[in-house]
Image (spheres, rainbow, N blue to C red):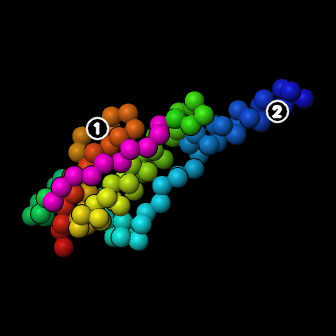
Amino acid sequence: MRRAIAISIVLGAISLSGFGCAWVKLTPRGEQVREETAENVVGCQDIGTAYGKTRTTALGLPRDKEVVRDEQVKLAQNQAALIGGDTVVQDGPPSGGTLNFKVYRCH
């Protein structure tokens, strides 16, 4: 019985660590901000920076990298919307749970 409970707890933790479980939601204004590459923002106005910082582990286990990145992008989109941006471009590799972005106004 104890073994079954332990297995259930471990499986639950694994599912929380990355098979979905995105905790970050886009704001209505953040939904209007898109992610692009540097090549696609030529001619756009650089208006600042934003970043996404989220946990890379849950319950001591690593979270799915795609889920983490998705949350980082959403956080940056929400920030970009607050400063009048409509586009974000990743600015370098992630560092821990932080991913930096440049914010542009293209429209």
In the picture of the structure, the residue carrying the numbered disc 1 is 93
Q: Is residue 50 magenta-colored?
A: yes
Residue 23 visible, this orientation: yes
Q: Nearer the viewer, residue 18 or 25?
A: 25
Q: CA distance from mark 1 to mark 2?
A: 39 Å
- The tag on residue 28 is none
Image coordinates for residue 4, horizontal then vertical, percent: 84, 31
Q: Amino acid at mark 2?
A: Ile
Q: Outermost residue, left direction? A: 43
Residue drawn at x 38%, y 33% as measured from the top left: 96
Query: Horizontal and vertical percent for residue 80?
Result: 28, 60
Left or right, 9 with respect to 24, comes to: right
Question: Which stretch is magenta?
Answer: 47-56
Query: In the drawing, does residue 72 fall left or right of residue 41?
Result: right
Q: Residue at x 29, y 64 (%)?
A: 82
* Residue type (three-letter) at the residue carrying disc 1: Pro
Q: Nearer the viewer, mark 1 or mark 2?
A: 2
